[in-house]
Amino acid sequence: MKVEMETDTVVLPGGEFLMGENEEDKYANDTERPRHPVTVLPFEIGRNPVTIGEYREFRPAHEPDLPADWPVAGVSWVDAREYCLWRNDGSRLPTESEWEYAARGGTQYAFSHGTVLEISDANFYYDEHGKRIGVGHRTPVGSYPPNGYGLYDMLGNVCEWVADEWQPMYFPEAGSSDSLVSMRPQRVLRGGAWDYLPRLLRVSWRDYLGETVRRDNVGFRIARSITK
């Protein structure tokens, strides 16, 4: 039985972009190297992360005391995958390449809009000196400006699961758009969260967790393939 749910998505045209570390980025590390060209096919992606309210349609008791318009958290990669399957509408987690392509919003900056992240740009807690400047909790989706593709909260609020297994470095092969060498069965996180500092909200930042781990700063958004 198909679940009738309305989730606002944005259709992205696809194309080639440079994935990985940004030029002159002092916070880049080996997990973001080497920078390499990737070709992404057209796809749909959620305008916002999945909210608590949307997730409660799947699991009604989830985070019962929190606002429905906050991005859902406390979900594992397995939970996120099960939610996508439950929707029965072709929803899935975005690939890591799709996620970074979407987060960049058509730019090649360290952040989607430029080289500096201000507290008015995204939900994060600390500045680069460790001073607390943020609200200290999740905020309603869409509270901060969208990126160039009209997507909200790609950086900050909650880290987001993507489909890929974790690889500690990129190893693109000749003629390959995005080839990775598998090292261990962990799942990739992207985007940074409400309790982070700006360097961890850079578009190229990567991290990982075990696929059954749940954290209060980790959520996800849906994607769909486009078939002609």
Image (cartoon, rainbow, N blue to C red):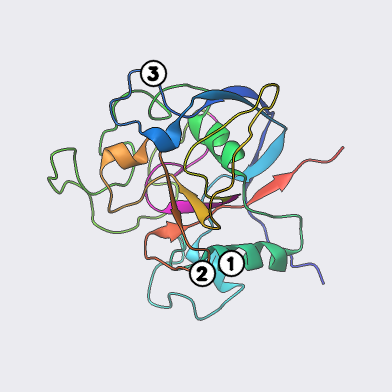
Q: Secondary structure at mark 1?
A: helix
Q: Residue furthest top?
A: 24
Give whichever of 4, 96 is nearer the camera: 96
- The residue where tag 1 is placed is 78
How far is mark 1 from mark 2, CA to CA? 6 Å
Query: Left or right: 155 with respect to 9?
Result: left
Local crowd size for mark 2, using a 10 Å CA cut-off: few (<14), some (14–19), many (≥20):
few
Q: Report if the CB atoms under discs 1 and 2 are less than 8 Å apart.
A: yes
Span highlighted in magenta in the image: 149-164
Residue type beneath disc 2:
Thr
- The residue where tag 2 is placed is 212
In which quadrant of the rendered image does the N terminus lie?
bottom right
Local crowd size for mark 1, using a 10 Å CA cut-off: few (<14), some (14–19), many (≥20):
some
* Residue 75 image point, x, y percent: 49, 67
- Dot 3 or dot 1: first in sequence order is 3
Q: Secondary structure at mark 2?
A: loop
Give whichever of 225, 50 is nearer the camera: 225
How far is mark 2 from mark 3, CA to CA? 35 Å
- Dot 1 or dot 2: first in sequence order is 1
How far is mark 3 from mark 1, CA to CA? 35 Å
- Residue at 52 percent of width and 45 percent of height: 167
Quadrant position of residue 198: top left
- The residue where tag 3 is placed is 23
- Dot 2 or dot 3: first in sequence order is 3
Q: Is residue 141 above or below residue 147?
A: below
